[in-house]
């Protein structure tokens, strides 16, 4: 009844409006028949993009967007346009300067991003199906910061992330919003903050909302679309809706940052889940060394390989967001106590190109013309490039790490971090049974990987041998060149070598490299030794400054 009254009042509101076409009001979402769009993708050259559905069968977007609607419509189009030069594509330091000079308020910053989200996500012709939850308190929190600023009560020392609106992948526990991992089984999972969200809040970040992902971080179905979840529907790429893949599993984080829906977003990676969507959406993504960031309160695949990481429009912001999430977590056995200085300032201190020694893979030089061209440009800029052919190494047993870890780690999350009053599953077997009870809605693409988890007979002793062997293989893949030639990093493309970096536990930073002739984004990926994040960020900043490739997606400018 409350919702119906709200919709009725909004109808009266619109009947009195006299906006010009340019000032057309943001309207609420209307469900639509997506069968035409689904049919148009039936013959897509990429089989994973032959969708069965696009809009979620269970998510009411108006339930997400109505609570803040009255706040958002207060911003008129002319005010929104006037704020663009201060916010759109700007880095955090630039935005902070505008706030300090009283050109911009925290409230305007939040409303600017909300305005963009409502403008594009409530329009079925532009929606990316990316924002699936909003923090209903975020505008009030921004106003409070403005009040404290006027009264001179802001902390004297503030982390650069202070007051910046951040979006989170929906497998990261966040108080006040559900954490679903995209699964209907967790659709009512109300939780406390995860460790990294606690750190963000301690440093003053404003949590704007949650974004879609590949369900169960793309470890549910086999060969299914990336960016799909039963809760959020099919995430779409702003550079080509239904044309290009979004990358996964942090699909919503990548698409939301690309479309300027927030200052930055947090993703998670097991093997490629930050690198892939960052590359596919022309944003900067960092997969940190395991242990640099806590995993407590994050829906897992693998305690061996999982890590959260920052996804941003530029390297400066990436370093800031990474720094804001760091801290030792006693609840995570892999969490490190060392502080690893230099990360926060890395984006402000690019590595001189002429001092860099980078390894270029001959296999990629032969295979990809843009990679070959970029390596040539780096050479001309003074970077010492060593071409090498990586050794062939065995990756046997990789799937068993994911299978056995998830079989153990998901129940541990459900027991320790989910809401027992609203979550009825406690194991993979329970999840399989839950999904089978309504397979058309809950698992339209099946659950072959979940079934594979139950079928995997790898013993605990066997698993430890697999982990040890794969770590040696992954490190040999990179160290052959890194050690022999004293390299700062190895250059890859997108998530092409994410699996090797995952088992080696090596960090990787991907930075926009350009666009294919089709318009599809492509990125250059720097892979280095453990805990070399500050160095990778300095090199990434140098590359980004010398070769600024990122362009905003057409239609979202």
Image (cartoon, rainbow, N blue to C red):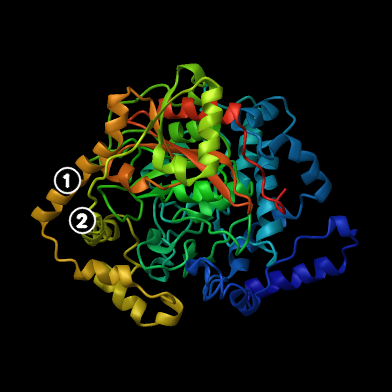
> In which image quadrant can residue 471 be found?
top left
Tell me the residue that label 1 is attached to. Answer: 469
Q: In this view, does 271 lie above or below 85?
A: below
Tell me the residue that label 2 is attached to. Answer: 397
Question: Disc 2 vs disc 1: Cβ atoms closer than 8 Å?
Answer: yes
In this rendering, would 506 be left or right of 172? left
> In which image quadrant can residue 463 be found?
bottom left
Local crowd at mark 1 within 10 Å, few (<14), some, or many (≥20)?
some
Expressed as whole percent of the image width and height from the top left, the position of residue 29 reads: 68, 68
Q: Which residue is drawn at 56% across and 76% down?
A: 42
Expressed as whole percent of the image width and height from the top left, the position of residue 142 reads: 62, 41
Expressed as whole percent of the image width and height from the top left, the position of residue 553 reads: 67, 49
Q: Earlier in the sequence, mark 2 or mark 1?
A: 2
Q: Residue at x 36, y 43 (%)?
A: 195
> Can you see residue 368?
yes
Judged from this view, the residue extending furthest toward the front is: 366
């Amino acid at each position: 009844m409350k919702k119906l009254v709200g919709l009725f009042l909004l109808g009266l509101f619109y009947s009195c409006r006299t906006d010009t076409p340019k000032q057309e009001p943001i309207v609420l979402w209307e469900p639509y028949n997506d069968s035409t769009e689904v049919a148009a993708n039936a013959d897509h050259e990429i089989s994973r993009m032959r969708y069965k559905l696009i809009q979620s069968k269970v998510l009411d977007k108006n339930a997400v967007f109505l609570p803040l609607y009255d706040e958002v419509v207060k911003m008129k189009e002319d005010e929104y346009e006037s704020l663009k030069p201060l916010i759109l594509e700007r880095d955090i330091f630039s935005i902070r300067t505008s706030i300090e000079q009283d050109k911009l308020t925290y409230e305007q910053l939040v409303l600017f991003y909300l305005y963009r989200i409502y403008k594009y996500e409530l329009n079925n012709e532009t929606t990316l199906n990316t924002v699936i939850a909003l923090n209903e308190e975020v505008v009030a929190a921004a106003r409070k910061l403005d009040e404290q600023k006027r009264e001179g009560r802001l902390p004297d020392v503030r982390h650069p992330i202070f007051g910046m609106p951040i979006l989170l992948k929906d497998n990261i526990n966040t108080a006040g919003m559900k954490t679903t991992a995209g699964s209907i089984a967790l659709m009512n999972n109300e939780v406390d903050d995860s460790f990294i969200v606690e750190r963000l809040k301690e440093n003053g970040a404003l949590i704007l909302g949650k974004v879609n992902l590949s369900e169960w971080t793309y470890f549910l179905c086999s060969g299914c679309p990336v960016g799909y979840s039963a809760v959020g529907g099919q995430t779409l790429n702003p550079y080509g809706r239904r044309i290009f893949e979004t990358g996964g599993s942090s699909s919503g984080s990548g698409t939301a940052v690309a479309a300027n829906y927030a200052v930055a977003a947090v993703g998670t990676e097991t093997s490629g889940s930050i690198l892939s969507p960052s590359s596919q959406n022309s944003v900067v993504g960092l997969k940190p060394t395991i242990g640099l960031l806590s995993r407590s309160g994050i829906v897992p695949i693998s305690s061996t390989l999982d890590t959260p990481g920052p996804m941003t429009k530029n390297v400066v912001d990436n370093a800031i967001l990474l720094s804001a999430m760091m801290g030792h977590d006693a609840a995570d056995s892999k969490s490190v106590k060392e502080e690893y200085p230099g990360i926060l300032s890395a984006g402000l201190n690019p590595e001189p190109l002429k001092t860099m020694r980078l390894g270029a893979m001959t296999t990629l030089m032969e295979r990809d013309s843009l990679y070959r061209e970029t390596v040539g440009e780096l050479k001309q800029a003074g970077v010492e490039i060593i071409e090498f052919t990586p050794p062939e190494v065995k990756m046997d047993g990789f799937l068993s790490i994911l299978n056995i870890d998830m079989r153990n780690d998901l129940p541990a999350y459900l027991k320790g971090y989910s809401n027992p009053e609203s979550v009825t599953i406690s194991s993979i077997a329970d999840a399989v049974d839950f999904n089978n009870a309504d397979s058309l809605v809950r698992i339209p693409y099946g659950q072959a990987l979940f079934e594979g988890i139950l079928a995997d007979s790898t013993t605990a002793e066997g698993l430890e041998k697999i982990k040890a062997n794969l770590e040696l293989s992954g490190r040999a893949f990179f160290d052959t060149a890194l050690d022999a030639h004293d390299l700062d990093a190895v250059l890859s493309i997108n998530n092409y070598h994410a699996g090797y970096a995952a088992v080696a536990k090596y960090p990787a930073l991907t930075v926009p490299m350009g666009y294919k002739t089709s318009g599809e984004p492509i990125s250059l990926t720097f892979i280095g030794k453990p805990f070399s994040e500050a160095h990778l960020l300095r090199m990434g900043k140098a590359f980004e400054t010398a070769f600024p490739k990122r362009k905003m997606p057409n239609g979202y400018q």
